[in-house]
Amino acid sequence: MSKVMSMRDAVAANVHDGDVVAIEGFTHLICFAAGHEIIRQRKRDLTLARLTPDLIYDQMVAAGTARKLVFSWLGNPGVGGLHAIRRRVEDADPASIELEEYSHFGMVGRYTAGASNLPFFPLRSYFETDLPKANPLIRPIRSPFGEETVYAVPPLKPDVTIVHAQRADAVGNTQMWGLLGCQKEAAFAAERVVVVVEDLVDEAVVRADPNRTVIPGLIVEAVVLEPFGAHPSYVQGAYDRDNRFYRDWDAIAREAVTTQAWLDEWVYGVSGRAEYMGKLGAERVAGLRPSGQAPSGSVDYGVYR
Amino acid sequence: MSEPRGARPAAGAGPSAAAATFSKSEMMIVAAARELAGQRVCFVGVGLPNIAVNLARLTVAPALELVYESGAFGAKPARLPLSIGDPTIVTGATAVVSMFELFSFYLQGGLVDVGFLGAAQIDRFGNINSTVIGDYEHPRTRLPGSGGACEIAINARQVFVIMRQSKRSFVDRIDFRTSPGNLGGAEAAARIRREEGWLGRGPSVLVTDLGIYHFDDSGEMLLDSIHPGATLEQVRDTMGWVPNVAQPLATTPAPTPEELRLIREELDPEGAYTK
């Protein structure tokens, strides 16, 4: 049965006030369209989990959707800080925000434990650092097979994980390529999964290349077709990262008033992604297309009867 | 990087005139790249390490395998990525793996020779802060935090650091220890690394805008080479302690015209890293 629905319906049905929400994707495949719809629906008291909160959580925090961040790297890569979040942390402006901080491997391990139904994930990190003091959920444990001590982090099980991908079929069998981040782990760890794709494809397309399936429809609640839903993040092979916007955001987010004006114009002021892309303009979009093609060679899976 | 995106306006008429002068940032990037000669696998941090490692790949270390925490192994970026998760590090890479595989099998499995990091604060033993300035609960400045730096410092065989010197960044006591260096000294650090099963030997190279440091037997940084144009007075004025200085002190060879051309025309024509 088809799970295809609009972004508005998918967010209304799957994101609730107070939820732990993970919009994952490491630089690549960050679903800004879903974040903006969550802002428009004025969801509140969310715990936002992501390795790199990125601009999307800076925007969602600025819009007042979040009470807490769970993360490992809080910045605008190659540009600087996330100013809306920093105002909350440094100046409690307009209110403080709770932080739960790990390293990247710690966050990956948390999703992995959540996806695998394990009580913790062990890793060789955090030794002789201040991170376990800053976050008491990072704890040393003794190996049951020797004298060694490693650190453990608890499972992270989002209420909802939202994943952007190149393509899926109507029941949510999802394929992606390029940087995979920890989208798979975050999806399997979640209670509900929303998949947002550039292309909706026939089941036969998925079955022709099963090694590329990262998330099975089995764990997916909703499939949303939303071309350019990752902008200003990117989709490998479809459109480039809009680095100009990442730089522009640095100036926009430095003041609360310019941040709110941006949200008014680009989030509250549009009905959805199609209108947002229309505002962005054809020229800007054309400039984000890859400068050429780099198709993978195809492989032969063989027929076995 | 076969297609330069355009050249910065040259100070003089030709390449030789442009090569006659160079910025402190350019000297720092060149010196850091040269330190990678002979290395095999390098984990590339965000910011300055990104341009230094890519310069090394085009000059002293053509066989260097670039590992990005975003999941690319053996990356061959055709342009200098602004972020370490850019699509150009995927196209043409040897492998693209999940972050779980990257951190578990490649890094924690012991395959990374050099972890190349930046830092906001560093102390004389190479311990790094990239989390907060001030108190953790009520920071004056909230910095990005660890990312992968904490586990890179522990699991990469050795750590290179690149950062600009200032009294605010070279401090007697860092405000937060994000990534461990030589802790309180080499002897204790070696014991702790052994007892806790770290694969890393800790920091081995620090390159700044003023010079090149290695770490002496006590685990403390030692100025081995000073960049042309920099003075010992500048070095001392930009550190929160009196630095150890090698005798004799070398002078870093100036950037070659080709190194400058690669930075200015191919890697960073907009001057994002060098201004």
Image (cartoon, coloured by chain):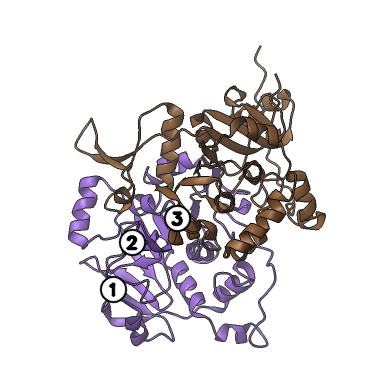
Chain colours: A brown, B purple
Provide residue B229's location: percent of width, then percent of height.
44, 87
| Residue A115 in view (yes/no) | yes
Provide residue A103's location: percent of width, then percent of height.
40, 48
Q: Nearer the viewer, residue A119 or B207?
A: A119
Q: Give the residue number, with chain letter if any, for mark 2.
A: B135
Q: Give the residue number, with chain letter if any, for mark 1.
A: B222
Which chain's residue wears label 1?
B
Which chain's residue wears label 3?
B
Q: Give the residue number, with chain letter if any, for mark 3.
A: B42
| Residue B106 in view (yes/no) | no
Q: Is residue B260 left or right of residue B231?
A: right
Per the image, label 3 sits on a secondary structure element best described as strand
Residue ranking furthest to the front = A94
Per the image, label 2 sits on a secondary structure element best described as loop
Q: Is residue B211 left or right of residue B2?
A: left
Q: Residue at x 42, y 51 (%)?
A: B148
Badge 3 local density, few (<14 within 10 Å), some, or many (20+)? many
Give the residue type at disc 2.
Asp
Provide residue B132's location: percent of width, then percent of height.
38, 61
